Image (spheres, helix red, strand yellow):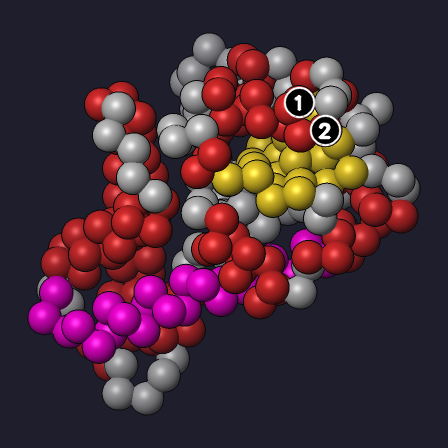
Amino acid sequence: MAQVCVFDAYGTLFDVAAAARVAADEPGRDALKAVWPQLAEHWRLKQLQYTWLRTITGEYTPFWEVTKDGLDWAMEKVGLIDDPELRERLLALYWELAAYREVPIMLAQLKAAGKQCAILSNGSKDMLEGAVDSAGIGEFLDAILSVEDVSIFKPSSLVYDMVGTRFGCGKKDVLFVSSNGWDIAGATGYGFQTVWVNRAGDPVDRLPHRPAHILSDLSTIPELA
């Protein structure tokens, strides 16, 4: 049984496509409406790729800068680079990403069962706090852990070390939950119990370490914990 349940934030608790989807539904966004799924996909992919490249090269920069760089690339890719007002709107919406609908109930069940809950994310502290406040889930979290404190992105072991440091627990006492296959591989190799939230039904990544559990959403996490 896990004592501490740790969640990745973006794509796991928070819907990273929400910013593009919400903006596309606003009046006067016809150009975005036609391409928003592609924009959201490109934005997320570049955001992740830039964290990996910056980790490899030792050129850390806060996640907010990576997020802006990824959006700029994505907007150019889909032909919207000349719309600075849209850029600012999308960035503003990223601070208000919706949580997946099962998240509040799931976290409340974990807390009622006496579990400690935390976020461990590449996100900057202020970004994470904004998303948590917007989603109204702060009361269920014992800690919001950001890679800002170690200046390197996941899946570096220095990031996973933060959990034991904060909670004084062993690796096997942690249930780590992420929607990112590469993050789960890193956390499994580190020694955490892991759950991959595979909402898209993707194949398991061809990496050395596989998830202990695979779920389609977060609703049954309390049963595993």
Circles 2 and 1, Cβ within 8 Å, touching? The answer is: yes
Query: Toward the viewer: 24 or 216?
Result: 24
Q: Which residue is mark 2?
A: 167
User: Residue 159: x percent and y percent?
Assistant: 50, 26
Rendered residue at 33%/39% (across/down): 48
Region rendered in magenta: 81-104
Above or below, 64 against 25 in this view is above
Q: Label 2 vs label 1: CA separation? A: 5 Å
- What amino acid type is highlighted by mark number 2? Phe
Image point 44% across, 47% down: which residue? 124
Residue sitting nearer the eye, 219 or 123 = 123
| Quarter location, residue 85 | bottom left
Q: Nearer the viewer, residue 12 or 165?
A: 165
Q: Residue at the spot x=66%, y=22% of the render?
A: 164
Q: Position of residue 56 (x, y in %)?
A: 27, 21
Q: Which amino acid, by three-letter code, is at mark 1?
A: Gly
Q: Secondary structure at mark 2?
A: helix
> Is 9 part of what is drawn in magenta?
no
**Where in the figure is residue 125, as x and y percent of width and height?**
49, 49
Looking at the image, which residue is at 28% across and 49% down?
65
SS for dot 1: helix
Residue 24 in picture, x, y percent from top left? 34, 75
Say which mark, if any, is on residue 102.
none
